[in-house]
Amino acid sequence: MIGDKNIKISICIPVYYGSKTIKNLVVEIKNTLKEYQLEVILVNDGSKDDTKEVCVELFNKYKFIKFINLRKNFGEHNAVLCGLNYVTGDYIVIVDDDFQNPPSEIIKLIEKASDSGCDVVYSRYDNKKHHWFRNFGSWFTDSVATWLLNKPKGLYLSSFKLIKKDIVEEIIKYKGPFPYVDGLVLRVTDNIEVQTVEHFKRKEGESNYTLGKLISLWLNMFVNFSIKPLRVATVTGVLISLFSFVFGMYFIIEKMLNPGVSMGWTSLIVSILFLSGIQLIFLGIIGEYLGKQYLDQNGTPGSVVEREYL
């Protein structure tokens, strides 16, 4: 398997303000995987710097490069899903453009897939070099995914992963505007392995994952890939109703035993505010489901390609 010329490796890279790193990343990928048939798909996710020009330069220089330029920023998962529509390799590796996942580690993912015969290999880090905020966001996303998506507890949903071609063919059947790649993977297969790899510090700039983007990603996972939030709303409603019934019975009995006891205004207001807050929260959850369904039915695109360089 190692260096098998009959094996084609596709590398899908979402690029967002990556003009300073993408050249060196492509060169190192080329040198690392020179024993394989190689294909690199670059997807510019609406960068406003000179990323497009750099990617076009790489396309003109290397025959194994495909470049997809999106008209605006759609988000990492949308860009990845767009790129997966252009891959032709036997194994597809998704890697970020920030050089925190060195190309030498791609070989480990390929070896793991070859030895185990699994469908997907996720990377795992002994020592992550992300900013604490990004690490917290990853931890939260991973914890929620364990509950919402029935993800195995020992599996870390890293953005650096390898997927077999037939699994990718199932993933790209999703045509909605709110993709979550790991959710799509877990829908298709449970034949998943994990490989420990190195993780480097970011060479240029800072993470583009803002709080707003993380919240958007969490909502995509909450609403698009599970109905458990609605079940939580149902269970919470039942529990509050039971609590209210018991609470009401308590006050009725207390009033019967002590007619002179006056009912408290504070407890009434607190109860009203509490129940109103719960209702608004769950109305918001229902609204998210309905709103995203409306946008999906309305034909909202997950990405729009400005130009293909194939």
Image: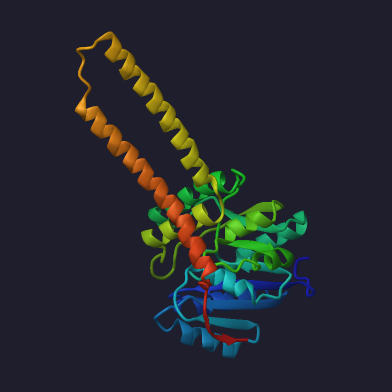
Q: Where residue 1 sits: x, y (%)?
A: 78, 65
Q: Where residue 125 sits: x, y (%)?
A: 55, 53
Which residue occupies 40% across, 51% down? 284
Say left or right for 234 vs 246. right
Say left or right for 305 vs 167. left
Residue 214 visible within the image: yes
Q: Where residue 147 sits: x, y (%)?
A: 55, 44
Q: Quadrant of residue 30?
A: bottom right
Residue lying farthest to the top in this orientation: 257
Which residue occupies 58% across, 58% down? 182
Q: Where residue 239 sits: x, y (%)?
A: 45, 31
The residue lying toward the viewer, choosing from 189 and 161, is: 189
The residue lying toward the viewer, choosing from 304 and 9, is: 304
Residue 99 visible within the image: no
Which residue occupies 58% across, 69% down? 81
Residue lying farthest to the bottom in this orientation: 60
Say left or right for 257 vs 5. left
Q: Quadrant of the C terminus?
A: bottom right
Which residue occupies 69% across, 72% down? 9
The residue lying toward the viewer, choosing from 127 and 11, is: 11
